Structure formats: C-alpha cells, structure tokens
Image (cartoon, grey):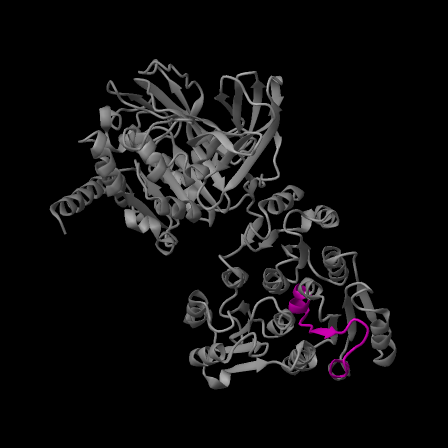
Amino acid sequence: MDRFSIRSLILVAFISFVFAITATSAHAAYSPPADYQVGVIYSQSSQDWVNRYNRGYGILEKQLRVMGYLQGRGWDVEWVYDKDLENPAKLAQYDVIVATYVFAMSPQAARTVTQYVADGGGFVVLFASPRVAPGVGGSERDDHWVYIMNHQGWEWGPPSEAYQTYFIDDVGAFRFVNRPAAADDPVVTGAASILRARGLSSLDMSLFRNQAPGAWIEYVRLLQNNNNAVQFMNLTQLTSPNLSTNYSIVNGAGGVRTTYLKGRTVYFYHSIADYLLNQDDSGHQTVSTGVRQLEIAGAWVESAILWAGGSGGRPGVLVRDGRTYASINVYQDGIYAHQFIHNPGNVCVTGTMRFRVFDPSGRLVSSSTRYKIGVEPGAKQRYAHSYVTRRLAAGTYRVEVEYVTTYPDYQRRYVEHAFVQRGQGKGIRTSLSPLTSGQVVLDPRVQRHAGSDRFATSLAIAKAAGGYPRPGGYVVVAGGDGADALVASGIAGAHDAPLILTRRDSIPAATEAWLRNAANGFDKAVIVGGRSVVSSAVEDRLKAIFGNADVTRLAGDDRFETSAKVASEIKRVLGPSYDGGIIVTNGSALADAAAGSAIAYGRRWPILYVQSNQVPPMVADTISAITGGAPKPAVWVAGGTSVVAPEVETFLRDNLGLPVTRAAGSNRFETSIRLADLAASTGAAWQRVGIASGINLADALCLGSYVGRFDGLLFLTNGRALNVATSNRIKENNKSIEKVAIGGGSAVVAHDVSGQASGLLP
C-alpha cells in the first residue's frame, strides 16, 4: 500500500470519528437501514484528469470526505474503484453507488454504470463533471473537452441518459441558495425525517453559499418531453454569474431525481459535498433555525441514497431520435445548403453529421463530416455547406445529408436526399431516404433479449426466463432453426427446462459455462434432433458435463419421426397429467411450428409434423397412442388449407376421433395471431407477450419457450413493423400486459417494432 493510500485511510477514519461524535451528540440518532450496501467511487482517473489542467484541485479529498461522513453516520459503505466500474458483477453488489466529482470514466465503465442503473441500481451524483456544448469542434490534441468527450466524458455519453437533464454551462454565481421545490417530494420528506430523527429542525432546509471568486456551479434544465426527471430543489442565484453568459438560474434545477428504466438516479446540480468539507465556511454556517448546513446537506445526501435505492412507480418511455434535413439553394455556380439537426425524442443524443454531393455521373464531388454533434430534445441546429464551381455542369445532382447517432451499443442512421439541377432556385427540401433506420425507444415494459448470434440469443432468453434452479434440473438442447429444433418446445415445457441452441459440432463457451454453473442446478440434458444437426461431439461434451446416463437424444430418421418421438416422450414424462392436446403443422411450413412454440411449451403439448395432404403412419399411430385415454384430447392445426389440406383435418377428426380446430391466416404472421387468439380464448394470459421474427425462426423458437413458461402469447413479425392485426390485439388488451419481450437483435427485429409495441401500451 502506498503512502497516499495509507494517508487516505487515516483521513477517512478520522473523518468518520468526527462525524460519529457529531451524530451521537444529537438528541436522537437516525439509523440507516440494515443490509443496505452503498458504494462510494474512489476515482484516481478523475484526479489524474484534473491534474492535467488544474493541478492541486483535490478530487480525492472530496470523495474521502463523503466516505467519512457516511461511515460516521452508520452507513455500510465500501470503496468502488475505477476498474470496479467496468465490472457488472461488482456493481450489482450495491443498492446505491455514490459519485462525487467523478470527472472521468473509461467508455466501458460509462456503459456499465448506465446498465447498472437500467437494471435496477441506484446512482447518486454529488456534482460532476466535464461538459461539452453541442456542436463543439476542435481536435483531440488541442481541445481537452473534445478528448474527454470522445474517451471519458459523461454528459453526452451513456450516464447522461440516466440523468435526463440538459447541461447549460459551468458558470457560477458568487452567491446562490438552493431550497426544497415541493414539500411532499420523497427526497424532501426523507431529508426532513432524517433531521428530525437527529433532533434537528426541518423547517428550513436551505443551502446557501458565498463562493470564492472563480468558483463554479452547474446550470441545467430538465429535458423537454421527458416526464421521468423530477426537480426536488430550486436553485436561485443571488448575484450575477462570474462569466459573460449571464444565464439566469432563478428557479433552476438544484437537484433532480430520475427514474431510468428499472433504476433511479439523483443528481445534485451544485457541489453539495463542499458543505461536508466546510468549503468557504459553508458547512458551519447556520440557517434560520440554527441548524448547521453540514447537517442539512448530509440529510439531503442520505435521503437521496434512500430514494435511489428504492423501487416502485412506472418510468416513462425513453426515445432516442436524432434527425436531419436540408434546405438547398442551387445557382449557376454551385449548390448551397443549410443542414439541420434536430431531436424529436426525449433524451439527448450525440452523432456524426455528413453532407455529400454526387455529380450527374454518380461521382462523389463534395463531402464534409463533423463528429460529436450533440442535440437536446426539442432543439434544432443549423450548419452551412456548399459545393461551388465556376459553373455547374448540366444534369442532375444528388445532395445527401446524414446524421448517425453514435450512443454506445446502438447506431441509428437518418438520411435525406434531394435531386437538383443547375439554377433550380431556392428552398429545395430534402426527403426521407430508404437508408434511414428507425428511432430507438426504451420502455421498461418492453425488453429485448438478444445476443451476437442465435446461440447467444437463446442463452440470453433462457437467462431472462429465470427460475433457476428448477425442479428436475433439465436443459433441452437443439441445433438451430431446423425442423428438429422447432418441435423441442413441448418437451422443454414438460421438464420445465430452458431451450438452448448449440452449434452442430461444438457448444458455445458462454453456454457451456452457464450449464456448468452449479447455481443453475442443471444435471440432465435432452438433445432434440439427429447427429446431422447436433453431432456426437456435442453429445459427448454434454455427457462430460452431466454424465453418460443423464444425456438422452430424441431423434428419428426424418423430421416426422423426430416429432413423433418427442411427442411420445412428452406423454411418458407427464403420464396422466398430459391432457391430450397436440399442435399439427406441415413439416415444411416451419414458421407455423415456431408460432406454436409458446403454446407447446406452456401447455406441454407436442408439435407433430404432417405432410400437406396426409398424416404419415408413424405420426398417426403416435397421435392415437398419446391421446387415447387423455382427459381433454384436442388438435390445433396451425396453418391454412394450402399447407395443411382439409383431408388431414378430416382424417384427424373422422379416423382418429379427435376434435380439430384450425388456426390459419393469409400468411405466417396472421397465423401466429390466430394461434394467439385461440390460446387467449382458452386460458392463456396477456400479461406476457412475445414478439419475434417470422423469418429467423431460431429466435422465435427460443422466445416461445420463455413466453410459454408464463403462459403468455407469441406473435411473429416481418422484423420491420408489427402486423396491423397484431397491433390491434396488443392495443385492445394493453391494460393486462405487464411485459413485452422482443426476441433477437435490432437487425432481426428492428427498433421500430419495439417502439411500436411501446406506443401501444397505456
């Protein structure tokens, strides 16, 4: 341990002792909740960054003081170091993480912290951080703001989305006051309760400050169109700012609490930690009731921690949406354009702006690019471009403008274009290009489960289904989106097992690690499909994991026989609890089998393949065997008469004596709707709805096992938009829907689809 670390520990111990003495001297003590784990960020990288530009400014001292305060007041706190911020498992240990002057994070840390909040973590920010005004230029070598923005910045990077406020500037009034914004706000009432528990008055919880010349304070405002952020403190300047911008902060946001997907953040827009340090004698000054501001600031911080670690309420939808268009003037000598960037969403976005001109031959003759163009919700920015020659050549030019949002983990491209000719005149407006992709909508009720490929997606879906360890300890393994895999849902449901996809000759490393994890409780595997789809090498690997006796394979000589063997095994596993239901579909119309996967899993029904106009003898014998004596035999035929002919329906009804119901639409998407209608009319629940591609069937198969476990409903989409009838069903039943699950990445099911689903919910 170096001398600085030892000195830090001594300082924290001393501060904790001082605050503990202060706390015990109060008339009554406030006890933080038990089993409430708080992490305080110790950011050496922030200190290193500050040392480059403002050597001697003590970032770590402020963080040490916050740690000492919380320890002294009885909180269970630990340090969270820079490297820890990149570790999701480490962050997940904490109910709340506190950041004080954390000016610098690695890009990975910024994404991980944001995801921690999205997954339900609490984040309390006691003042941060470097800002970059939208549209700032400069090079990384000469402009440290650009460097920070590209590498370690916060406010236009991932965590800024969790704060959901717009940063105006870092100018500061010499004197300001921050007061509660609403008496009934939970952070306000929480701070008041803490003060009273310590025997202190809560009638005046103001924080005022006489800053030293050159001091700074952040000015902000809430984002337009965003109802997730609530202002709980009002910040008012008592003197003019110390910079020429002279921005008025009368009734500005002094503190904001925000719901972000599953988590919560609290952000203080002045340096509340300075009261704990007694900077500018701020902590020892008293308010009208005689209470020191150190006590008041501490109560605010503790109340913020309590609120951020809580849950409840429904956060609103987040819409990431940056767009561009241009107004073009074309004269004899050239093309002149004003390109506009605007944001109709409700969170800030950052992106790359491009302008291009193609001559009549299609050759690119002019282009310009500007990076890191940020724009707040409701804002519009204008940039000038031109392509000038002595005289434009005759013919048609294509003018193209583009804005690509570059928020980590997604990219949205918006392109417009116009065709123009020499001397055409003024005010030519661009129109939307087919190159444009959809806006990104984040709704905590609409969750995407996806991986880098079908195998990783199947693992993500299995993890999301949860409930591990499950009784029996089974996992069902299949080989992709082929015919054998698509009959695996029923046996997975019979064992209450996850359905996992594997490569033909190897199990993906992440999947094997998950299967080996003792906490998941797997000890048996069922392979569905022959060795041409799941090889002996994979079977041997599973036997190495579970033992020879605990790995079985269900496979036939063809898809029809495989479906029959799976059906017989379902009957064997369930015994008298099998009700006799089956789904019949054409062995070549695999989309219909995928559409039935949620029903097959939830009701533990087999999917049996038939030929278009007849039932293979083995399949007929199997149907007769498993439905005989069953309490509620029923056949649901998935698909229209062009894929399963009336003769099949007649055979099942007349020869096998079974009641038959057909679910059919004009295409695979409508057939999935008819199946969902049939399931809903016979007891399936609208609480859980799944949406998956009807083209890439592997994701639909796996999502069906997830949705089916909750007795939910699965709809297929073309990947670009929801079917009108699907939209109508969701809207009609939206008050019952608690969660919509999207299966697969945005390349398979576009962001537009999740946005549509979100818009259909109340």
User: Above or below — where is 757 with respect to 714?
Assistant: above
* Residue 80 visible within the image: no
260 sits to left or right of 662: left
Q: Residue 603: x, y in percent?
A: 68, 69
User: Above or below — where is 611 with respect to 209?
Assistant: below
Quarter of the figure with the C terminus: top right
17 sits to left or right of 658: left
Q: Residue 49: x, y in percent?
A: 25, 36
Along the viewing direction, whichever of 89 and 639 lies nearer the viewer = 639
181 sits to left or right of 37: right
Residue at the bottom extreme, as displayed = 549
> Which residue is at a point 70% across and 61% down the rendered structure image?
684
What residue range appears in magenta? Answer: 597-620
* Residue 36 visible within the image: yes
Give the total number of marks visible in the rendering: 0
Residue at the left extreme, as displayed = 3
Along the viewing direction, whichever of 559 and 85 lies nearer the viewer = 559
Q: Residue 155: x, y in percent?
A: 39, 34
> Which residue is at a point 42% across and 41% down the rendered structure image?
158
Is residue 666 in the magenta section? no
User: Above or below — where is 127 with respect to 120?
Assistant: above
Is residue 603 in the magenta section? yes
> Which residue is at a point 71% across and 74% down the rendered structure image?
608
Along the viewing direction, whichever of 424 and 262 lies nearer the viewer = 424
Q: Residue 223: x, y in percent?
A: 50, 29
